Amino acid sequence: MSLIVQKYGGTSVGTLERIQTVADRVGRGSKAGHQLVVVVSAMAGETNRLLELAGKLAVQPFEREVDVLLSTGEQETAALLAIALQERGYAARSFLGHQIRIDTDSAFGRARIRSIDGERLRSALQRGEIAVVAGFQGVDEEHNITTLGRGGSDTSAVAVAAALKADVCEIYTDVDGVYTSDPRICPQARKLQRISHDEMLELASLGAKVLQIRSVEFAKRYNVPVHVRSSFDDSEGTWVVPEEDGMEDILVSGVSLDRDQTKITVRRVPDRPGIASAILGPIAAANIVVDMIIQNASAAGDADVTFTLPKTDFRRALAMVEQTAQSIGAQEVSADTDVVKVSVVGLGMRNHAGVAARMFDTLAREGINIQMISTSEIKISVVIDAKYGELAVRALHAELVEKPPPAET
Ligand code: ASP
Ligand code: MG
């Protein structure tokens, strides 16, 4: 008998029919003798619908109330699934975040889980019940309802699995695993059987939106085996696991495309200490996460500073930068919202030189200009013109994933 946490995403519970299908699957697991905790998302589109409602009443609705509102999406699914299970003769009980004490900080809309008191879930399981948990929500010290950020049900599931020391956390979704690239862009992409936490962290942050990044951080920290798989069939998906022997032999395990990028350049700023901090300080203070940063000095004693950030924060950031530019005597500010970031990720890059060279060479052969480059131990990213994004992904996948690696010299 295993203790299994299953998480079903929005499309997997998007209609009553699908909720019935989920109930059948959960039921099969229970009949097989497993203890089951099922974490659910809101029905597909529901979170956006609720956000729009709030947006019609206020331009900036108070975040506390937005969380009260959004949490109802998951509450709805949890109740419906519990009802469907009971109708099939299973003992099931739904739980909201505050009822099992998913304690979070008070950052509404992006709260972080601090602790989970698994006691009520454990007693439910001991009574032989299937526990259905509303994902995405928690409660802060003041008993306020909080939510964990878009895609947060993944994190609820992995955190619950960690708290209960579950044998596995199964993430059921509308794709059947983690792919070497987005199959809609790159038909040659193939499903990975296993991927390390570190690669998954990079891919999650790079826009391969299978898992919320914080869920991978949890999985890594608490050693929760995560299995990403399809809710539409029984095929084996992708296991997200600690690094294993042999994983480093694969040079590049994924190529990803991040369309959520914009670029701001401040031209000809005086090249003296404090300038980067003057430009980027206010942006950081406004909680905007800047991704890549480049500064290049010119011969004339001034410099250009370029950086990228998510589309949602673009307007706010641009206004701030324009203000700073004036006060520090920069020549001009320019912006480009037509850019994407293409990245290659792989543990093998640690020990093998030459991936960057092959990447740049491939892009050059396609006539694609590189605007910015950044690297980490297991990742290389470039910012390019948006219209070449998909072409770049296909070309890089063909060169770095499909081709056998060149013989060692
Ligand atoms: N319903 C929330 C969202 O759409 C959380 C989730 O589905 O994971 O972001
Ligand atoms: Mg999701």
Image (tube, helix red, strand yellow):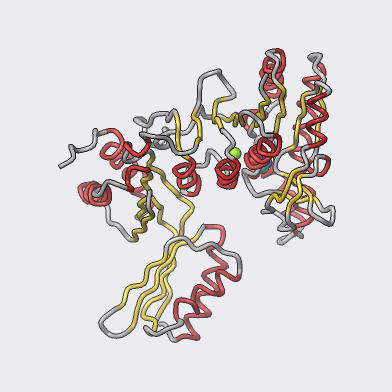
Which quarter of the rendering shows the N terminus?
top right
Q: Where residue 164 sits: x, y (%)?
A: 71, 35
Q: Where residue 16 sits: x, y (%)?
A: 72, 24
* Left-right relation of 91 to 308: right
Quadrant position of ligand 2: top right
Quarter-of-image position of residue 339: bottom left
Q: Residue at x 71, y 29 (%)?
A: 38
Q: In front: 209, or 241?
A: 241
Q: Residue at x 32, y 46 (%)?
A: 349
Q: Residue at x 78, y 42 (%)?
A: 117
Q: Residue at x 49, y 77 (%)?
A: 277
All told, the count of numbered labels is 0
For the view shown, which residue lies furthest in the left direction?
409
Q: Where residue 140 sits: x, y (%)?
A: 79, 53
* Left-right relation of 383 to 214: left
* Left-right relation of 369 to 210: left
Which quarter of the rendering shows the C terminus?
top left
Q: Is residue 90 above or below residue 315?
A: above
Q: Where residue 289 sits: x, y (%)?
A: 54, 62
Q: In front: 164, or 379?
A: 164
